[in-house]
Amino acid sequence: MNNADIAKALFEAFAAGDAEAARQLCAEDMTGSQNGGPEMDLEAILHFALAVKNAAPDFRYEDAVRSATETGFVEEHRVLATFGGGAQLDLMVCVVADVEDGKITALREYFDTAAAAALGAALNPG
């Protein structure tokens, strides 16, 4: 599986809410961050992905543009979802990843935090 295939499989797993499939693509010590924020470990990333899928069962990625790099991949995509109460998410995201020995070792995700407000509200109601 090349790095672009790994990217495609990872986002398919996230969209399906399949934590085990996502885990199989990642190194045990994988780290991730959003907008340069604090690092999250693999379990925190999987927990977040499942929380989003549970809050918005129609959560999906569209219009993906992915490129393999020598050290990983870069993918830009739209994140679309409808949350309980009808709030809509339509967010452009760019993900930069490192891959070593066929496993993702780092994910760095970048997005407009103002455009992600519906996501924050859905995950932190009240």
Image (cartoon, rainbow, N blue to C red):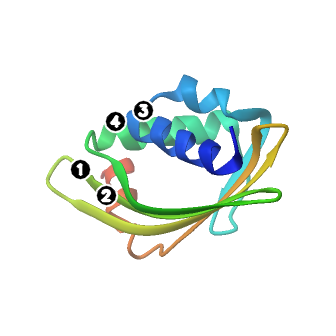
Q: Between residue 54 and residue 123, name the one nearer to us.
A: 54
- Report how far apart the C-alphas of labels 4 and 3 lie in the structure: 8 Å
Q: Which mark is residue 83?
A: 1
Q: Identify residue type, mark 1.
A: Phe
Q: Is residue 121 above or below residue 8?
A: below
Mark 3 vs 2, N-terminal side: 3
Q: Position of residue 63 (x, y in %)?
A: 38, 63
As measured in the structure, the alpha-carbon distance from the residue carrying label 3 to the one carrying label 2 is 14 Å
Q: Nearer the viewer, mark 2 or mark 1?
A: 2
Which residue lies most toward the front here?
1
SS type, badge 2? strand
Give the residue pinned by disc 4: 54
- Residue type for callout 3: Gly
- Contact flag, marks 2 and 4 (Cβ < 8 Å): no
46 above or below 79? above
Q: Quadrant of the N terminus?
A: top right
Closer to the N terminus: mark 1 or mark 3?
3
Q: Residues within 10 Å of mark 4 (few under 14, many from 20)?
A: some
Task: Name the disc covering residue 17, or none.
Answer: 3
Examine the rendered structure and indicate whether residue 80 appears above or below residue 15: below
- Give the spatial CA distance, label 1 vs label 3: 15 Å
Mark earlier in primary sequence (2, 4)? 4
Direction from residue 118 to residue 47 in the image, left or right: right
Task: Report the amino acid beneath label 2.
Answer: Leu
Residue denoted by label 2 = 80
Distance between the alpha carbons at the discs numbered 2 and 4 = 14 Å
Q: Residue at x 14, y 55 (%)?
A: 86
User: Of callouts 4 and 3, which one flags the residue occurring earlier in the amino acid sequence?
Assistant: 3
